[in-house]
Image (tube, rainbow, N blue to C red):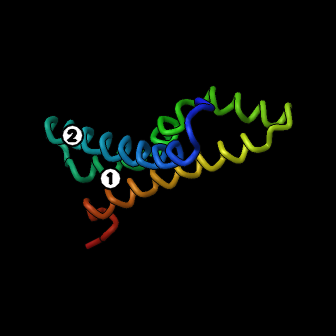
Amino acid sequence: MNEKVAFLPAFIQSYFIAVGVLLGGAMIGALGAFLSGGQPLTAMYRFAGDLRIWAVVAAIGGTFDTFYVVERGLFLGETKDIVRQFLLILSAMGGAQTGVAIVTWLTQEHISP
């Protein structure tokens, strides 16, 4: 992540990017399921679970930058960068979990008859 970007805006953006990727991907996937004759709500619920890791990866800006920051933190002793990166990943995971919770709430797939 660019070091000139302040941490708090990056933290908030990471959360909302993950929510957006998950909700958008699940909705577009459900539209595709509908157009192909499938069950859109079931597909939306399934896609939300499958897209969770990709929402986190998209929110943190890819994996190579994260590995570079962790490497710099470990080998150059910059532990502040490791903590910041961990908090950004945690924020993205929280956003992905919020997106899954919204999709679960919308589709009601967790309720059995």
Q: CA distance from mark 1 to mark 2?
A: 12 Å
**Residue 64, quarter of picture:** top right
Q: Is 86 left, or right, of 12 in this rendering?
A: right
Q: Residue at x 58, y 51 (%)?
A: 90
Q: Residue at x 41, y 47 (%)?
A: 16
In the rendered structure, find residue 76 and report the number of the disc placed on it: none
Q: Residue drawn at (34%, 66%), measured in percent from left and top?
A: 110
Residue 14 placement, left or right of 112:
right
Residue drawn at x 42%, y 49% as measured from the top left? 49
| Above-or-below relation of 58 to 109 | above
Under circle 1, the secondary element is helix
User: Please, is residue 109 above or below residue 113 in the view?
Assistant: above
Q: Amino acid at mark 1?
A: Tyr
Residue neighbourhood size for the residue with mark 1, other residues' Cα within 10 Å, grouped as few (<14), some (14–19), many (≥20): many
Q: Position of residue 60 (x, y in %)?
A: 54, 37
**Which circle marks residue 45 in the picture?**
1
Q: Is residue 35 left or right of residue 83?
A: left
Residue 104: which quarter of the image? bottom left
For residue 57, above or below residue 94: above
Q: The disc labelled 2 sits on which kind of residue?
A: Ala
Residue on which disc 2 sits: 33
